[in-house]
Amino acid sequence: MSFFTLDNEAFAGFVRYATLVVCKTMAMSLVTSYFRVKTSSLSSPEDARVVAPNDKEKQKELLRPNDDVERARRAHLNDLENVVPFVLLGLLYLSTGPDASTALWHFKIFFWSRVWHSIAFIGAFPQPSRGVGFVLGFLVSASMAVRTLCALS
Amino acid sequence: MSFFTLDNEAFAGFVRYATLVVCKTMAMSLVTSYFRVKTSSLSSPEDARVVAPNDKEKQKELLRPNDDVERARRAHLNDLENVVPFVLLGLLYLSTGPDASTALWHFKIFFWSRVWHSIAFIGAFPQPSRGVGFVLGFLVSASMAVRTLCALS
Amino acid sequence: MSFFTLDNEAFAGFVRYATLVVCKTMAMSLVTSYFRVKTSSLSSPEDARVVAPNDKEKQKELLRPNDDVERARRAHLNDLENVVPFVLLGLLYLSTGPDASTALWHFKIFFWSRVWHSIAFIGAFPQPSRGVGFVLGFLVSASMAVRTLCALS
C-alpha cells in the first residue's frame, strides 16, 4: 500500500507545507537579486564588464561584496542546508505510515520556524532570534529521521 | 491510487528529465575540477601542502581564487538553488495527478533552460543570456508550485 | 504498481541509508558550529556586534575566516552537492523497479563512501583519501542515473 497519495492526510499536509517551504527557499533568490540591484553589487566579472565597459575601477567596485547581499546569500545557503534535508527526510518518514496528526505538527513547526529564521536573518535581528528558528527546524528534521529509523527496525 | 509509477506518462517523463537535469548538476563538479587542474587553483590548504610541501609561497599561490574556477562554482551553486527545488516541487506536483502534456512541457522547458543557463554561465556570455535561462527555469518551478497548491484547496 | 512501499526490499533499504546519509549531511552543521565556537569565528556582522558591542577591532577579528570552520563548510557544501543528488536519483531509480540486491549495494557503498569522505575532509587527511570517497560516491550516483535512463528506453 502506497502512502504517497492525497487521500493520506499526512501526505496531503506534507505536499502543502513542503511546497510552501521550497517556495520560501526559492524566494531567497529574489531577495538576493533585490539587494544586488539596490546596492549595485554584482557577482560575476562578465556582468561588471557589461555595466561599466571601459572602467576597470568601477568594475572592481561593482564586484566588492556587500553586507546585505552576503546576508541574503547566507540565508539562502542555510535554507538549502536545512529545507532540502527536511523535504527528503519528510518523504522517507511518510513511507513508514506515521500518525497523521504527529506528522502534521512536524511539518507546521518546520515551516514556521524557517519563515521566522528568514525574517530574523534578513532583518539582522540580534541573536538568538535566528538561532531559535534554526534549532527548531533542525529538531523537527532530526525527530523525523529518528522516527523513520525506529519504524524500520 | 499512486501517480508515482512508470505507467503514468507524466511521471515517466519526470523520471527522464529529472535524472538528466540532476546529472547536468553533478557534471558541474567535473567542470570545476577541470578548471582547478587547468589553472592550478586548489581549495584546501592541506591539498596545497601535498602539491608544494616545502614552499609556503607556492602554497599561497595555489590557493588564490581563479576566475574560471569561481565561475564554475557559482554555476554549480546556482544549479543546487534551482534544480533541487525543481525536482522536489516536481514530485509534489505529480502527486496531484496533473495533465500529462502540461506536466511534460514543464519538465522539458526546465531541462533546456538549465542546459542553456550552464552554457551561458561557463562561457561567460554577456547578460541577459544567463538571466533568461534562470528566469525561465524559475517560472517553471513557480508554475508547478502554484498548480500544486491550487489542486490541494 | 508502486515500488515506494516498505514491502519492497530495495525501497526499505533506501529509506534506511538515505535517512542516515542525510543525517550525516545535517551533522556537518553541528561540526561547523563546534569549530565556530572553538575558534571564535563568526559569519555575520550582526553576531559580532552582539559578542563585542563596542569594539570594532574585535568584531573584525571575530569575522576573520578560520581554516577549520572553512574546511567544515566546504565538507558541508560538498555533501549538498553529492548527497542530495544521490537521494533524488535514488528515488527516480527505484521507480524503475531495480533488482533489490543491486540496489542495496549502491546505497551501502554510497553511504560508507560519504562517511569516509567526511572523516577525511574534517581530519584534513592528505589526498587522495578524500578524493577516493568523492569518486566512489559520484560513480554510485552515475550508475543509478544510467540504469534509470536505460530502464526508460
Image: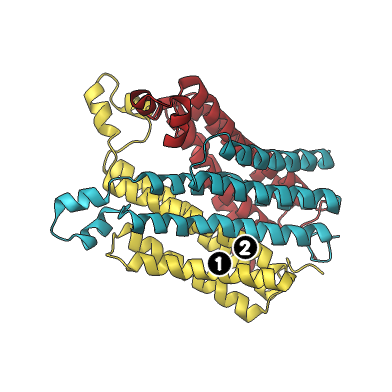
Chain colours: A red, B cyan, C yellow
Between residues A40 and A56, which one lies in front from this camera angle? Answer: A56
Q: Secondary structure at mark 2?
A: helix
- Image quadrant of residue A3? bottom right
Q: Nearer the viewer, residue B63 or A46?
A: A46
Quadrant of the image for the C terminus of chain A?
bottom right
Hey, what amino acid is under mark 1? Ser
Where's the N terminus of chain A, which quadrant? bottom right
Q: Are marks 2 and 1 in contact (CB under 8 Å)?
A: yes
Chain ID of residue with mark 1: C
Q: Amino acid at mark 2?
A: Leu
Q: Residue at (21%, 58%) from the top-left corner?
A: B49
Q: Residue at x 36, y 63 (%)?
A: C119
Which class describes the residues within 10 Å of circle 1: few (<14), some (14-19), or many (20+)? many
Q: Quadrant of residue B138?
A: top right
Examine the rendering and report whether any part of residue B115 can be seen: yes
Q: Earlier in the sequence, mark 2 or mark 1?
A: 2
Q: CA distance from mark 2 to mark 1?
A: 7 Å
Residue C73 position in % (x across, y down) = 39, 48
Mark 2, other Cα within 10 Å: few <14 / some 14–19 / many ≥20: many
Tag of residue C141: 1
Question: Which residue in the structure is indicated by mark 2?
Answer: C89
Q: Is residue A150 visible?
A: no
Instruction: Kindly identify the residue that appears in the image at 23 percent across and 27 percent down.
Output: C58
Say how many tags the image has. Answer: 2
Q: Label 1, secondary structure: give it.
A: helix
Q: Is residue C128 left or right of residue A14?
A: left
Q: With respect to residue A120, does C96 lie above or below?
A: below
Image-based side of A96 in relation to A119, left or right: right
Q: Residue furthest left?
A: B54
Question: Residue B46, image x and y in percent?
Answer: 25, 57
Q: Residue C91 in the image: x percent, y percent?
A: 66, 63
Q: Which residue shows up at 24% across the image and 32% down it?
A: C61
